Structure formats: structure tokens, C-alpha cells
Image: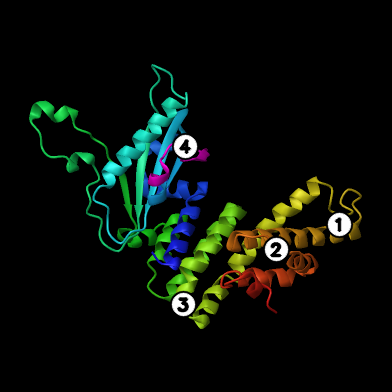
């Protein structure tokens, strides 16, 4: 696997580490009336300590837990980035599910007489070749006599094959995952511009700064880097000023509310007009600075040096806006601040 592919795969996994992405995956692609009884506010990403190091190192997986009918439901998501399907995937998910149950039992979460929580295995495949591997262990086992049929292992996983969903994705206007699937299969730069605009509109409505930062990072490596310099500028322009600005303004407003609660907006309590204006302006600058710093950490996996921290602190709102857009194409932190 190339370095670029590895970065893409890691970024994709980080995307689906956000509850909003997992909820979109379930509602838009798994579907079913049972989702009406799921409390999505309880979505929790679990650890995979119960899985062997060797198993974890070979597979991109994550386990989510959510309340369904007042009890735990486990969602086991496997991300498949290989070019060809894994014929033994049904057995892999069966083994993984068994390990999860064993961990719950060994850890004392289950007592004798308790019913084990249901587990839904989901395989998300974005390879180029059609997925033709069996989705059930039953299809992997040789036929047996009728008397033995009740004893063979029966386990299925839910397959989501991205390349078969590109047309359906266009019909799901309010779906985060649909926009991601479209960007994975874009036809030309105009489609990227259109889908990117839709994506930023959805992100702005979610008020989720962490997901937004992760999405920017993924867009840079998975989409924008496929184009030349001129085309990159076109894509970046498609997010400015409307979608990116709306997203930043929402983040700023939340920062202002936090500052107000802490009594840090000058003159607010006294109601002095000059103090209010000054305080709001400081809130705007602080909000953008905080959000920009979080983007730096998300993109480059590091905090700013004291020199860059001072530049951010002294920067105007316009400078923060300009630097924020550069994060999409910057290869390193120096390129962000290169004026």
C-alpha cells in the first residue's frame, strides 16, 4: 500500500469515528423500521481491546454501541480498502463477533441467564472490483446431511458496496455519507465543486467542529490532491465564501456563547454599547482563532509553535479566514502561514 493510500484509509476511518457519520450510514444505507427505536444520542465508539493485536493490525475496524429498545446494540463496522473482495469475510466477522461476546462475558458484563446483546456486522467496501464474496458463513461450508444442517455456523454481515451506490447517492440530498460516496467516485471537477458545496452546507448545520476538521483533512488528501494547482484553486473557491464562511460563523457564535457564560465579553454585563461591540469583536476573533488552531492540530497532528501561536493571536479575522482556506492544500504548516 502506498503512503497516499495509507493516508486516505486512515482518514476514512477517522471520518467514521464520528457519531454523525455512523448515524448517516445506518439511516441512509442500512435502513429499516427498527431504526425508529434507536437512540442515536447514545452512539458510543468502543475500544477493541478484546481483539488480538494481529487481528487489529490487519483489519480496519471499529465497534459502536447504541441503545436499542432500552438495551445495548453493538454495531461492528469493517472498512474494506482492498482492490478485491475477501472471500472469507463472513468468517472474519463471525470470529470477530465471537471475540466481542467472549470479552463481554469474561469482563463480567454478562451474568448467567443474561441475553447477549445483538451485534450488527457491517462491511463498507470501496474497492474497484465488484463484491462477489458470500455474505453468509452458510455459503462457505460444504453441504451436509439434513440431520446435521441445524448445527452448521450461520452468520451474516450487511454489505455496503460504494460503487453500486453512486447514482442512489445523488438522490439523498441531506446525507453526509452520500456526499462522501460521490466524492470517492467523482466524474469531473464540476461535480466535485457541486458536491463540496453541498457537503459544507450539511456540516454547517451540524455544528460539529471536530467532524468538520476531520472532513477538511480527508478532503485534502482524498480529493483535492488528485487535481493540479489550478483545479485545486477552483475547488477551494467553491467553499468560499458561503459554505466555509457559514461554518466558521457557526463556530464563532458558539465560541461567543461560551465567552459570554464565562463573563469574558467586555461590557456585556453593564450593557455599555462600546463594551458590547468590543466584546463581540473579541469573541469573533477568539472563536476563529480557536477553530483555526483545532484545524492545525487535526491536519498536521501537532500544535502550533510559539511563533505561530503568536501570529494567530495577533491576526485579524481576515487573516484567519485566509489561512483557514490554505489548510486544504498545504503540505506542511509553513505553507499555511506563507504570506
The residue identified by callout 4 is: 65
Could you tell me how far apart the alpha carbons at marks 4 and 3 are, in whole angstroms? 38 Å
- Labels 2 and 4: the sequence-earlier one: 4
- What numbered label is drawn on residue 276? 1
- Labels 2 and 3: the sequence-earlier one: 3
Q: Residue furthest left?
A: 145
- What numbered label is drawn on residue 138? none
The residue identified by callout 2 is: 304
Vertical comparison of 71 with 47: above or below: above
The residue segment tinted magenta is 40-55
- What numbered label is drawn on residue 227? 3
Kindly state the secondary structure of the residue where label 3 is placed.
loop
Who is closer to the viewer here, 105 or 326? Answer: 105
Kindly state the secondary structure of the residue where label 1 is placed.
helix
The answer to whether the residue labelled 4 contacts the one labelled 3, judged by CB atoms less than 8 Å apart, is no
Q: Is residue 134 left or right of residue 92?
A: left
Vertical comparison of 154 with 278: above or below: above
The answer to whether the residue labelled 1 contacts the one labelled 2, judged by CB atoms less than 8 Å apart, is no
Where is residue 112, by image quadrant? top left
Q: In the rendering, at what x and y percent does residue 239 appear?
A: 57, 70
Amino acid at each position: 500500500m502506498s503512503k497516499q493510500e495509507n493516508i486516505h484509509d486512515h482518514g476514512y476511518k477517522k471520518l467514521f469515528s464520528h457519531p454523525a457519520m455512523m448515524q448517516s450510514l445506518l439511516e441512509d444505507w442500512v435502513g429499516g423500521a427498527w431504526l425508529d427505536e434507536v437512540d442515536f444520542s447514545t452512539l458510543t465508539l468502543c475500544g477493541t481491546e478484546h481483539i488480538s493485536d494481529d487481528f487489529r493490525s490487519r483489519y480496519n475496524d471499529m465497534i459502536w454501541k447504541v441503545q436499542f429498545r432500552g438495551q445495548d446494540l453493538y454495531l461492528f463496522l469493517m472498512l474494506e480498502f482492498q482492490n478485491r473482495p475477501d472471500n472469507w469475510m463472513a468468517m472474519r466477522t463471525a470470529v470477530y463477533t465471537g471475540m466481542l461476546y467472549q470479552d463481554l462475558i469474561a469482563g463480567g458484563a454478562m451474568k448467567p441467564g443474561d441475553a447477549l446483546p445483538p451485534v450488527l456486522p457491517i462491511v463498507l467496501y470501496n474497492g474497484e472490483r465488484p463484491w462477489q464474496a458470500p455474505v453468509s458463513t452458510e455459503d462457505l461450508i460444504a453441504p451436509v446431511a439434513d440431520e446435521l444442517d441445524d448445527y452448521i455456523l450461520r452468520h451474516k454481515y450487511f454489505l455496503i458496496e460504494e460503487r453500486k451506490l453512486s447514482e442512489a447517492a445523488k438522490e439523498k440530498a441531506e446525507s453526509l455519507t452520500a456526499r462522501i460516496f460521490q466524492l470517492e467516485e467523482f466524474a469531473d471537477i464540476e461535480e466535485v465543486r457541486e458536491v463540496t458545496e453541498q457537503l459544507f452546507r450539511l456540516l454547517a448545520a451540524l455544528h460539529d467542529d471536530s467532524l468538520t476538521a476531520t472532513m477538511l483533512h480527508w478532503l485534502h488528501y482524498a480529493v483535492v490532491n488528485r487535481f493540479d494547482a489550478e483545479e485545486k484553486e477552483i475547488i477551494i473557491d467553491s467553499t468560499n465564501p458561503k459554505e466555509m464562511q457559514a461554518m466558521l460563523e457557526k463556530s464563532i457564535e458558539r465560541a461567543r456563547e461560551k465567552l459570554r457564560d464565562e463573563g469574558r465579553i467586555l461590557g456585556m454585563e453593564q450593557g455599555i454599547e462600546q463594551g458590547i461591540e468590543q466584546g463581540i469583536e473579541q469573541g469573533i476573533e477568539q472563536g476563529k482563532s480557536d477553530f483555526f488552531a483545532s484545524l492545525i492540530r487535526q491536519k498536521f497532528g501537532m500544535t502550533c509553535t510559539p511563533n505561530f501561536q503568536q501570529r494567530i493571536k495577533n491576526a485579524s479575522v481576515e487573516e484567519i479566514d485566509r489561512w483557514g482556506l490554505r489548510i486544504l492544500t498545504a503540505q506542511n504548516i509553513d505553507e499555511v502561514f506563507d504570506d
